[in-house]
Amino acid sequence: MPEVEERARVAREARKSGVPIPRSGSDDDIPVSDVVQRQQAEARERALQACLPSARMAAEVGLTCLEADQHPREIAAYLDDPEVLTLILAGRTGSGKTQAAYATAAEAARNGAMMRNRRGQVVRKQLLVRAWTVNGYLQELRPEGSKNPVWEIRDRAYNAELLILDDIGVAMDEEATRFFQETIHELLSYRLNQGYRTIFTTNLRARDAYNDRGEKVQVGLATRVGHTLWSRLNERSTVLTFTGPDRRMVTELDW
């Protein structure tokens, strides 16, 4: 009975790895597919818990933790639209962007999002999520920046089905800016090609701001990230603005 023996072997391996197995019934009663699903669910939950900052633990319940002006309906619509892959949450410090980002991650990990599979079919799938601040990710890619090898950091970021990159557009020196622009452009290009979802948060407006005398008073995100990365950010993207009672969904990256 090769099939029965294989199911029993997989069940034993699952038990060794800590995947919960029901006490009722024997190893032979557990289909291989069920074991794999449990292992995947365990991996998704570990990844979610690892990326949730301690100050944001309320976000792990998903979109139900969000206030109305944090766009829970618009975020749900984003997760239901397989054609929109990049979400930008833009607004001032303290406006709830980061909490919304992590709540979205928890929602996607637990309840799923609409994605295209390898055959192009649209299916709801629970997602493996990862998260960094932009500066934290860049730092981990530098020599001695992490206890983990660089290839492992890159692999986690490249192949997360949903990736949060918090606080894009912070000021950097010229060398760091070049490294940032090249690294994030390469990462986002790969993720768009694979059909993976990415969430960015930023405190910057889209464009430079000027006063009445024509003097620049604020650098916009488009200037900070450069033309090439800005073009990628506009690909299969939408933005939600966090600016107070009049927050709204914006259809183009012009907030």
Image (cartoon, rainbow, N blue to C red):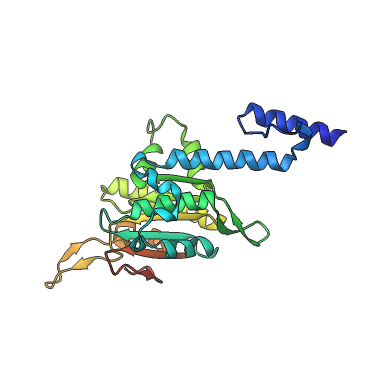
Residue sitting nearer the eye, 57 or 201: 57
Q: Nearer the viewer, residue 244 or 136?
A: 244
Left or right: residue 189 compared with residue 94: right
> Residue at 46% across / 54% down in the picture?
198
**Measured along the vertical axis of the image, is residue 84 above or below residue 130?**
below
Left or right placement of residue 55 versus residue 26 in this view: left
Total count of labels: 0
Instruction: Please provide percent x and percent y for residue 77.
Output: 48, 65
Can residue 156 be seen here? The reply is yes
Q: Quadrant of the C terminus?
A: bottom left
**Rendering coords of residue 88 (x, y %):** 39, 60
- Vertical placement of residue 44 versus 120, above or below: above
Quadrant for residue 35, please give it: top right
Name the residue at 49% across, 51% down: 162
Single out the residue that lies furthest toward the right.
Answer: 1
Residue farthest to the top, as pictured: 16
Indicate the quadrant where residue 55 lies: top left
Q: Is residue 185 visible?
A: no
Which image quadrant is residue 69 in?
Answer: bottom left
Q: Give the image location of residue 189, x and y in percent.
A: 49, 56
Residue nearer the viewer, 89 or 49: 49
Q: Position of residue 4 (x, y in %)?
A: 82, 34
Q: Quadrant of the N terminus?
A: top right
Q: Residue furthest front?
A: 24
118 and 125: which is toward the camera: 125
Q: Residue at x 40, y 48 (%)?
A: 59
